[in-house]
Image (cartoon, rainbow, N blue to C red):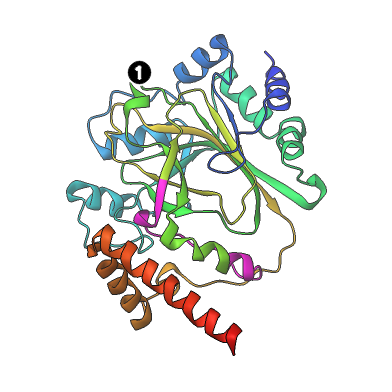
Amino acid sequence: MSFEYLLEKIYDTPLEAEPYPHLHINNFFNEHHFAQIISAPEILVTGVNSDGELFDALFDKGYKIIDFPGCITNRETYIKWHRNKSRQQRHNNSSCEGFGVTLRLTASSSPIISELMTFMNSDQFQNSLGAKFGVNRDKVYSDSGIQKYLDGYEISPHPDIRQKALTYMVNVNPGAASENQEHHTHYLKFRKEFRYVLAYWEGHTEENRCWVPWDWCDSVKVQRENNSIVSFSPTNATMHGVKARYNHLSSQRTQLYGNLWYKNTDVKDGPEWEDLVVKRTDREVSASIVGSLKATVPPGIKAFIKNKILADKHVVRDRLKKD
């Protein structure tokens, strides 16, 4: 069984421009391979009736809880929170309302998943993605795996930290109705009034970028399609986020997930989103009031005032010429 045809797909597919340059390929795996992947016992985890049973089943199949953005690593703390989804318990970034658990497959039992994991970690696959975005493979190392994200997982809009050279996500969700679930990655743009954050990041390349609240951005596209890959090289503009709200007992959000990381970086911590909030000044408020007043003036009066001003300018100009 060979996955080498995926390399050709990556090479032949042009990048999409919106909301920023990225690779997006639907029907990534051929039909035969994808059917085998999502029916493999490591991917298709069902027949559980509680969070505790789900964790036991995932552990039995070779998954382990990992330290991952937007998540906690304590099983019992998560189960306790998930029972009531208490927002008073905060274990995440202040720009988020929830938190989840991410588990990575560390061992496989089925041939299709074993070969897939080997391919994901191969130089062939990593080099093809790196070449697509002009990433020098000599300056980076790879990190990849098969991951499941439980209900409550949330990572608010962010462009990724500067240490990351490339990221990719492939949806391999086993649920028949997975595309209708609310657990997919959003790709976003800053709203006009918050685009100054981009300017700050562009002017402070020595500082890391942060997560921001959801209402600072607009979602441009959502990667709902099963058997799809999205990949991009992080910049100040590569805003993306996830807010998972779904029933993970019937099926779980599952991805082939990987990154290329720079080996050497000299980046320090930057400000959090609270530090980037710009308060309106009295001058801005005054300008806003003036704008509101202008909006109430009838068009005929506006035209009269404009013509009067122009006429006065002509009178002054003619007098200056005579003098």
The local secondary structure at tag 1 comes to: loop
Residue under the image location 26 percent in, 33 percent down? 247
Q: Is residue 14 left or right of residue 298?
A: right
Instruction: Please tell me whether residue 154 belongs to the stretch shown in magenta.
Output: no
Q: Nearer the viewer, residue 231 or 262?
A: 231
Depth check: give the residue in front, 211 or 151.
211
Horizontal relation, residue 118 to residue 87: left or right: right
Q: Position of residue 191 (x, y in %)?
A: 42, 55
> Which amino acid type is marked by label 1?
Ala
Between 51 and 25, the residue placed more toward the observer is 25
* Image location of residue 256, percent across then percent down: 54, 33
> Which residue, as the protein is rendered here, is positioned at the far left?
84
Q: Is residue 69 above or below residue 16?
A: below
Q: Name the residue under label 1.
A: 176
State the residue lying farthest toward the right.
138
Residue span colored magenta: 201-218
Residue at the far front in the pictured view: 322
Q: Residue at x 34, y 49 (%)?
A: 75
- Structural crowding at the residue carrying mark 1, measured as other residues with C-alpha within 10 Å and reported as few (<14), some (14–19) or many (≥20): few
Q: In which quarter of the image is residue 47?
A: top left
The foreground one among 308 and 287 is 308
* Residue at x 52%, y 26% (from the top left corner): 228
User: Residue drawn 24% across and 52% down?
Assistant: 81
How many labels were placed on the picture?
Answer: 1
Give percent across and percent down for residue 303: 33, 62
**Within the magenta stretch, is there residue 212?**
yes
